[in-house]
Image (cartoon, coloured by chain):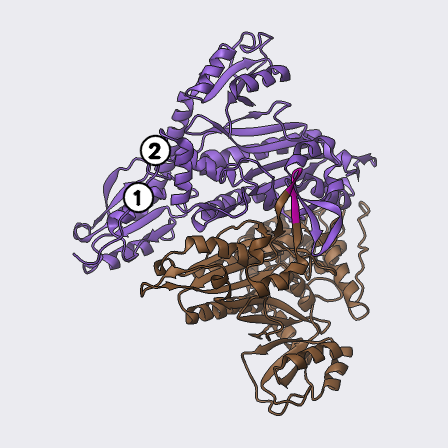
Chain colours: A purple, B brown
Amino acid sequence: MGKKKKEFVEEITPMEQDFAKWYTDVIKKTDLVDYSPVKGFMAIKPYGFAIWENLQAYVDKRFKDTGHKNCYFPLLIPESLLKKEAEHVEGFAPEVAWVTHGGDEELAERLAIRPTSETIICEMYSRWLNSYRDLPFLYNQWCNVVRWEKSTRPFLRTSEFLWQEGHTLHETEEEAQEETLQMLNIYKETAEELLAMPVIVGIKSEKEKFAGAHATYTMEALMHDGKALQAGTSHNLAQHFTKAFDISYLSREGKQAYPYHTSWGISTRLIGGIIMVHGDNRGLVLPPGVAPTQVAIVPIATHKEGVLDKASEIFEQLKDLARVELDDRENYSPGWKFNEWEMKGAPLRIEIGPRDIENKQVMVVRRDTLEKTPVPIGELEARIPELLKEINTNLFEKAKKMRDENTFYAKSLEELKEIMDTTQGFVKANWCVDPQCEETIKKETGATMRCIPFEQEDLGGDCPFCGKEGKSVTYFAKAY
Amino acid sequence: MGKKKKEFVEEITPMEQDFAKWYTDVIKKTDLVDYSPVKGFMAIKPYGFAIWENLQAYVDKRFKDTGHKNCYFPLLIPESLLKKEAEHVEGFAPEVAWVTHGGDEELAERLAIRPTSETIICEMYSRWLNSYRDLPFLYNQWCNVVRWEKSTRPFLRTSEFLWQEGHTLHETEEEAQEETLQMLNIYKETAEELLAMPVIVGIKSEKEKFAGAHATYTMEALMHDGKALQAGTSHNLAQHFTKAFDISYLSREGKQAYPYHTSWGISTRLIGGIIMVHGDNRGLVLPPGVAPTQVAIVPIATHKEGVLDKASEIFEQLKDLARVELDDRENYSPGWKFNEWEMKGAPLRIEIGPRDIENKQVMVVRRDTLEKTPVPIGELEARIPELLKEINTNLFEKAKKMRDENTFYAKSLEELKEIMDTTQGFVKANWCVDPQCEETIKKETGATMRCIPFEQEDLGGDCPFCGKEGKSVTYFAKAY
């Protein structure tokens, strides 16, 4: 029966058995990423990087549509600059990679590889801002950053990652706050609409906020294993940095004034989120918005006349409507290809063989539901974009259901601890907002406050963890 | 007479007076770039970065259309890896920035910030390549690199720069050579078609080739001051790295084999080239292909009814045909805006005032020729794209003429020296290709061989510099 075809042998550890192992199996076997010889540094392979490129294109357009422009700032930051904002250096110094030599010479001052760029950007802004007429500054940068992490996991926590960091300056406190929330909202829409990943948006506690921020806003997603992922943050930095870096300007009133400042970022970490929100024991389930291949066309019995031609025709028919790939590799059986595309999470697979051609149809298989439906070839152009939308909606609804089913209330510290020791998930409580109580919760249960959501419900009552007055309904979880 | 408008006060040093100062004035006053507190590191401002983004979008598409995919590899490279290819480390070690500490801890092994990524990429490729079925590897990465430079100039030579580096593996020597030349050709077309920058393409000498390469191909452009700029290189690395890194695979014949390897790159240096090939004493002259604003619309007498409305209408009419900006800033006079857009090199300016509206026309001003022509409003949609093409052609022709007028022959070392000491420019000679002669030329005249062009002419005769047998017509120049 022809040549021997390569058999499908990849196996993924079931997530119920070992979630961490499942994650590692998925990212390695689907060729998203690989470990590198430098501990904690990853090499992002083409399939993984294409997800990032699709995400980047969407987000970059959102930024530009809201008036932001891209810049590029130096990778290295002199130690003295990093130290200018006291809380900031305290937060970041322990994770800084230091450059001490250039060529054969020892440097007079150590240089930090940027862990984030507030300090170097503020230094430049202080030179660029003169008058209120120059404001607002609405700038963003796409770059790599380095944070020396002890324990790492590809995408989720790595010593180097790719991200964007927006840094804006404004005349008024109100404008800065508006910007902070606008960008958080763009992140929320990116997560929910592009990535089909439901998120809770709200504010961080004093303890959990960004080092140097006035207030940090966050979006938090729940993973399959009941752990939370901080998926994006937007900081209102008030005048903390602009005063420390003496960024002043001549105001409308002819006085020297300090602008108000925001920063906001999302990173390759989101790819980890996509994997852990949508993936299953067969592998990846990619949301159509970022899937490198949205539709994989697999011809069957390619030795039969007309099959490859028809498959190519369908490829041509669809290639401007979606990201389509014609899998005409030799030496791989159709079954092997079905399995591989399933594992790689392509939202749709089109199977086409001699009998289908006779019937003027193809089989369309959804990755999210594994449903297999015949579709007349003439209807593909209309049906494929619809199906991709349906898949996106279904992924979002499924993830939301999963999250809602794993969101609990706790009436005591013991209850919280029990949940964290068993199912995990989000736990809501009418919290006292006291840092001392927060410390105890973390120590006793391993959970941290994830956010105080904008949408508050009326839970009433005292803080279930310490008995002080309950102030804000807050989400707690163990987090990545 | 209304509010007092801001006057135009920027002044650019004439290039004939001081070319280096002219360059610095232009990049600073047009907001392309700024110096940073770290010596040799630059901050690329939005106007400069937008040029890079336009270039990037074009080139990235060319790469993808030829089957390449993007990846991302670690920023840091262990010293031991960098040392695996002997010539390579010798070439790059003197310019490496070394990371020695992570947080508070001293690292067991120093890590180099990538000066280029052959070594780390080969290390990863050695893990990824198994069978001839996996070949070719056609991967590219967009990233920052660091080379510790003693003397720097923004865009042209900086200790950090942005670039792309393609790294491919092939089964055969022929395929690798084809790839090397294909990518050089894409660079040439990028330079000539997108950037209107004529280039000489050819091969480097043994002395000038990339550290570790079998052969380096280059494109060389001539700047206004008669110096050459190496604008892009493509290397055939043969098996130098694949053997050093033990990248082997099972061949079609069932044997262990080493693949053939190429790498190729262009960088933000090209922006320096654009400035120095097209710019004039009024400032930048940007080729339409990468100009952030291709058409600046400046309304005149904006207090008169209908002017701003009409200007907005024209903006709407053109905005999908070109990168258009409506300059409706208050507090700046039209004259100031004319000067600014001229200085910033926008290819076209549209001036529109009450009288123009009456006449149903606008004034269109070309940056390259400073010609001012009335164009009926109804014809703008057809005329603007045509004009942008005409400008591109004119810029290319002008630059080519300039280059040809500054390309000389030398009949002796003295003649070469005299040219290098006066006008500078390209000098062609039927060279002996001897490294010793090359050394002498550099020492005596400051010129280096730029390339042996693919297109050879018949000059005949002995090497004019040393009298040995003339072998190949070669371009010499002082270079950036």
Extent of the magenta region:
B99-106
The disc labelled 1 sits on which kind of residue? Arg
Asked whether the beta carbons under mark 2 and mark 1 sit within 8 Å of each other, the answer is: no
For image coordinates 57% across by 64% down, the residue present is B86
Query: What residue does disc 2 label?
Result: A14
Subunit under mark 1:
A
Distance, label 2 to label 1, CA atoms, is: 33 Å
Q: Horizontal placement of A98 versus A336: left or right?
A: right
Letter of the chain that mark 2 sits on in the rendering: A
| Same chain assignment for discs 2 and 1 | yes
Which residue has dot 1 on it? A383
Q: Secondary structure at mark 1?
A: helix
Q: Main secondary structure of the magenta part?
A: strand
Decide which of A414, B410 is in the foreground and name it.
A414
Decide whether residue B100 is among the magenta residues.
yes
Res. B98 in view: yes
Q: Residue furthest right?
A: A255
Q: Does A450 sit left or right of A113 as displayed? A: left
Earlier residue among tags 2 and 1: 2
